[in-house]
Image (cartoon, rainbow, N blue to C red):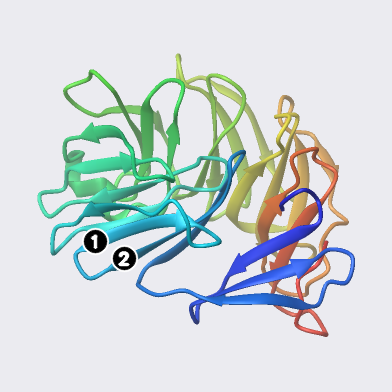
């Protein structure tokens, strides 16, 4: 969401669509090239990122400030989870490079145990702490690597599959679980659980999106009731569950910088549109 007036959405067929929140109809459409395609919003504005042959290309949404890096033939490119800006590459040997949206290198990390990040269902990067967190799916473990370390370390062991990660206020990471529809807050320094909330009739958590002020979490989940929940980020208390406008899974596209507007897409909307 840009200046509370415009939403830009990168679609799976390679188009960049602009919508007005006042009219909410199709606006400007820009064709993207390359694969994968990513759209990253920061305080500095909007950037598109695409793989073009052996290059990764980042440029502003109007086609300016072009930045590139050279890729290896087997590099897998991934975008960080919501609330964590940037992207990363998993190289052939399992090592990892983290970039910001302008492709400046933020972190170089060795391969984690069991090549975990290549098959991870999510990863987040803490810019201030220069730390990368990823889900090791084989052991349902959250791994961490910090700049200056020589090896990865486990910070949170779990007895069920972790599906989603998000960074919240300083020193806290949020985990979303696959089987019970639960959200857990973990203290990164001690590994201690701060709270765990099981969503009403929840089946699995798809994504956790912190609000810009860090006070709330917006959680998308597959349930037989609603698919978007608002939690208190400190206590885990359910603040609201009436946001959903879809009969199927929902996805948080963006939250406005002032926290007043939330853009959603989902399955099952009668008119096939996103909702605000």
Q: Is residue 271 above or below residue 191?
A: below
Which one is in front, 140 or 144?
A: 144
Residue placed furthest toward the front: 64
User: Can you give x and y, in whole percent of width and height, for residue 56 in the image?
Assistant: 29, 58
Residue placed furthest toward the top: 190
Q: Is residue 24 left or right of residue 95?
A: right
User: Can you give x and y, in whole percent of width and height, for residue 55 in the image?
Assistant: 24, 61
Tell me, yes or no, whether the two marked residues, 2 and 1, touch with CB atoms within 8 Å.
Answer: yes
Please tell me which residue is depicted at 40% across the width and 54% down the height of the picture: 121
Residues packed near mark 2 inside 10 Å, few (<14), some (14 to 19) or many (20 plus): many
User: Can you give x and y, in whole percent of width and height, for residue 27 in the image?
Assistant: 73, 75
Q: Is residue 137 left or right of residue 60?
A: left
Q: Is residue 109 above or below residue 38?
A: above
Which image quarter: residue 149? top left
Which image quarter: residue 182? top right
Q: Which mark is residue 55?
A: 1
Please tell me which residue is depicted at 12% across the width and 55% down the height of the picture: 92
Residues packed near mark 1 inside 10 Å, few (<14), some (14 to 19) or many (20 plus): some
Locate the C terminus and report the quarter of the image it occupies. Answer: bottom right
Secondary element under disc 1, as helix, strand or loop, is: strand
Q: Can residue 156 be spotted in the picture? A: yes
Q: Is residue 76 above or below residue 96?
A: below
Residue placed furthest toward the bottom: 271
Task: State the residue position of label 2.
Answer: 51
Q: Which mark is residue 24?
A: none
């Amino acid at each position: 969401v840009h200046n509370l007036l415009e939403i830009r959405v990168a679609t799976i067929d390679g188009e960049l669509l602009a919508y007005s929140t006042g009219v909410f109809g199709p606006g400007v459409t820009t064709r993207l090239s390359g694969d994968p395609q990513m759209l990253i919003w920061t305080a500095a504005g909007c950037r598109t990122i695409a793989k073009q042959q052996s290059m990764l290309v980042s440029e502003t949404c109007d086609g300016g400030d072009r930045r590139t890096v050279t890729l290896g033939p087997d590099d897998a490119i991934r975008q960080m989870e919501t609330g964590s800006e940037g992207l990363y590459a998993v190289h052939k040997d399992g090592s990892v490079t983290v970039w910001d949206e302008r492709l400046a290198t933020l972190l170089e990390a060795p391969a984690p145990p069991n090549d975990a990040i290549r098959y991870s269902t999510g990863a987040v990067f803490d810019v201030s702490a220069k730390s990368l967190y990823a889900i090791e799916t084989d052991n349902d473990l959250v791994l961490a690597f910090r700049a200056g370390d020589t090896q990865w370390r486990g910070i949170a062991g779990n007895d069920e599959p972790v599906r989603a990660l998000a960074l919240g206020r300083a020193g806290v990471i949020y985990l979303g679980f696959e089987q019970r529809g639960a959200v857990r807050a973990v203290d990164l320094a001690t590994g201690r659980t701060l709270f765990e909330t099981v969503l009403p009739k929840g089946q699995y958590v798809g994504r956790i999106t912190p609000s810009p002020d860090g006070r709330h979490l917006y959680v998308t989940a597959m349930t037989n009731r609603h698919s978007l929940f608002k939690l208190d980020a400190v206590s885990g208390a359910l603040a609201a569950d009436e946001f959903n406008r879809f009969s199927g899974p929902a996805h948080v596209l963006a939250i406005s910088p002032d926290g007043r507007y939330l853009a959603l897409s989902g399955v099952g909307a009668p008119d096939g549109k996103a909702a605000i």
